[in-house]
Image (spheres, grey):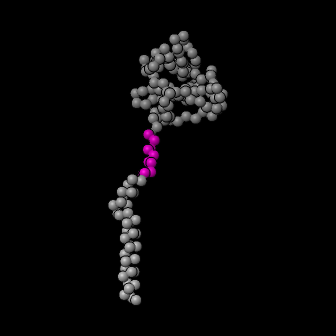
Amino acid sequence: MRNKVAPFFSVAIGSIFIITACNRPSANQAATATNTQPKPVEMSKPAPADTGRLVGVWYDESIKTEQGQQIAYEVVSKGKKIYIQAITFNSNNLKVSDSPVIEPNATLLKRNGNVFINANSPNEIYKVDKAGNLLIYDQTGLVVKCKKVL
C-alpha cells in the first residue's frame, strides 16, 4: 500500500507547489508592482522669504483698518531697490524686524533726488522732512504727515 500512496503524495505535493508558484509573483513582477505603486508626494520646501533691510517706520495716525488696527509704513531696501509697505498693529504693540519680509503688495519706489516716487503711479510722492517725518503727496498736494517711529 505504501507504493500506491507514494505516487499520490508526490503528485499532490507537486500540484500544491505548482499552484503556489503560479499565484506568487516572480521577482520581476514584484519589482514592477512596487514601481507602479504611487510614490508619496514630496512637499517642496518653501522658497526663502524675500526680505530686505529696514530703513525706517512711520506711524500714520490719520487712518485705521476696518478692524480698528493702526497703520504704519515700513520702508525696506533690497539691493538698490526701495519699497514701502503698510503694516498694521494694535495699540502700542508694534513689532518690526531688522530684515522684514517684502510683501507682494509692497510699493516699489524710485528715487529722484531727495524724494521717492511710486514706480507705478508717478503722482504718489514720498519725502522725509528735516524732522524725520514721512510726507506723502499725491496730485492734490500733501495727503498725510507720518511721525517717525524707528
Q: Quick one: which residue is furthest to the top in this view? A: 140
The image quarter containing residue 16 is bottom left
In the image, what residue occupies the spot 61% across and 31% down?
Answer: 89
Q: In this view, does 14 lie above or below 82?
A: below
Most extreme residue toward the left is: 28
Helix, strand or loop for the magenta stretch, by majority: loop
Does the magenta-highlighted stretch encompass residue 39? yes
Residue 78 % position (x, y): 43, 31
User: Residue at 40% across / 69% down in the picture?
Assistant: 20
Q: In which quarter of the image is the C terminus?
A: top right
Q: Position of residue 17 (x, y in %)?
A: 38, 73
Which residue is at the front of the view, 57 or 14?
Answer: 14
Q: Pinpoint residue 66: horizontal percent, then vertical percent.
A: 64, 26
Quadrant of the rendered structure where residue 73 is? top right
Out of 25 and 142, give the one closest to the viewer: 25
Farthest residue to the bottom: give it: 1
Judge whether 2 appears above or below 52 on screen: below
Q: Nearer the viewer, residue 121 or 110?
A: 121
| Residue 11 image point, x, y percent | 37, 77
Is residue 56 highlighted in magenta? no
Residue nearest the viewer, comparing 34 with 13: 13
Q: In which quarter of the image is residue 81?
A: top left
Residue 90 visible to the viewer: yes
Residue 102 is left or right of residue 91, and the answer is: left
Q: Is residue 115 visible?
A: no
Q: Which residue is drawn at 58% across and 19% down?
A: 145
State which region is magenta.
38-47
Q: Is residue 7 above or below residue 53?
A: below
Question: Would residue 17 be found to the left or right of residue 72 on screen?
Answer: left
Residue lying at 40% horizontally and 30% vertically, measured from the top left = 79
- Point out the image quarter for the N terminus: bottom left
